[in-house]
Image (cartoon, rainbow, N blue to C red):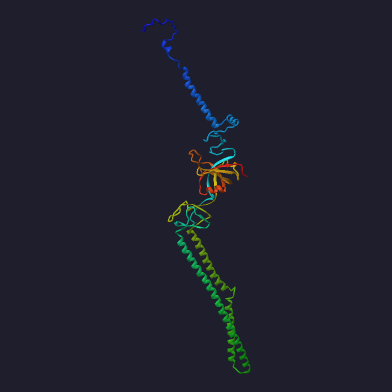
Amino acid sequence: MATPDPNEPDLPLLDNGVSETARARPKRTSGRWRLIFVPAIMAVFFLGGILGLYFQPPGLQAAFRTLGLEPGGGTDTPMAVAIEQVTTREEVAVVSEGDVVALGRIIPRGDVIIVSPPFGAGDARIARLNVAVGDVVGEGDILAVLDSEGQLQDAVETANANLAVSEAALLQTREQIRASRVEAEASLARAEATNALAAAELERTTALVDRGATTRATLDTAIARAQEAALDVERARATLSRYENGAAPVQADIALAEANVQAARVALASAERDLERGRVRAPSAGTVLDIHVRPGERPGNDGILNLGDTSEMYVEAEVYQTLIGRVVVGDPARITADALPEPLAGQVVAIGLEIGRQSITSDDPAANTDARIVDVIIALDEAASTAAERLTNLQVVTQIDAGRGE
């Protein structure tokens, strides 16, 4: 026990039932409440700010309008802004009143044409390619030659030879008919001359018999010769009639020869059509976009090459069925993509008539990949078409200013 200091004044001690240890302990109740209350207030303000900026309740919007402010006006960083509420799960696409946004792809006029081997080519392989990627071709140009062309070319030459033989046979038939007619005419002339001579001889013989200067036998001989000569004339006339124009025998011979010629011509035309099975022609003018096979390979399901008319470029946009009612022909459109240095301008020129399934999707794994859409075709203006002519099938984002067209 400590010894009291004799110089320290004596003070009365109060005993309130509290020990000296309890009186010496500091009070911590108010500090504990501050540690809980201050963070809670900060959390409420932070959460309220986030919810206010995201949902933008009417009061906050009215304050922004009164103060002339807009969300995100003080920063270049994009922030969440209010979008129109939709009643479906489709991920889209109204960024402001009247605007419709949809995914799309750049296509050439008439879309991409997949050029395949001609019908009946069978298992023919590519013998020669006449074009390369980027070449501009005209309608009907030979793009590739198949290895069956040689055999088909032989068939054409054979058909040509058969046609020449048939034409020669027709010419021979006509010449034979002409010669036979000349011969028949000569036979008739000779028969008529003989008949005239026999008739004159009969007349003289008859006069001599009447004068008794000749015998009856001589007269009978003259009569027989005259009758024979007359029959020869009739026979010659009948033979000549066979070669007159319109006579059945002549027409039959010529008709047969002409039919052979026509059959040979049909065979030649068929062989020439078959020859086209060994050649791949351009169905229309355009630019070669891609080639899928090389010489020696047999074309597969992808065809031989892709062809497209890149002189005019379009955008095929897939607009959700719930929004297609807003879009009309003539609406202006703005097309953007990471690969484009600047947005492209265009105009809606056609709206599909059928609801289909979405084929263009974003990279978002949560995106709806089974949405129902309507194809909308947008024609790019001249400058935009030139900028996009080498970007076929590029995925783009299309913003349509709906309701501005017709």
Which of the 4 image quarters holds residue 403?
top right
* Image height of 143 relative to 168, above or below: above
Question: What residue occupies the far left of the structure in this picture?
Answer: 1
Residue at 51 percent across and 28 percent down: it is 47
Q: How many marks?
A: 0
Q: Position of residue 378 (x, y in %)?
A: 57, 46
Residue 312's x, y, as percent?
Answer: 55, 50
Viewer-closest of 224 and 11: 11
Question: In the image, is residue 293 above or below residue 50?
Answer: below
Q: Quadrant of the C terminus?
A: top right
Q: Is residue 152 above or below residue 346?
A: below
**Residue located at (53% from left, 29% from top):** 49
Residue 119: percent from left, percent from top: 49, 56
Which one is in front, 221 or 253? 253
Which one is nearer the viewer's eye here, 199 or 320? 320
Closer to the camera in the image, 315 or 201: 315
Q: Quadrant of the N terminus?
A: top left
- Asked if residue 376 is positioned above or below residue 144 in the image, the reply reads above
Q: Residue furthest front?
A: 7
Residue 157: tell me if it is visible: yes
Q: Position of residue 357 (x, y in %)?
A: 53, 43
From this viewpoint, is residue 227 visible?
A: no
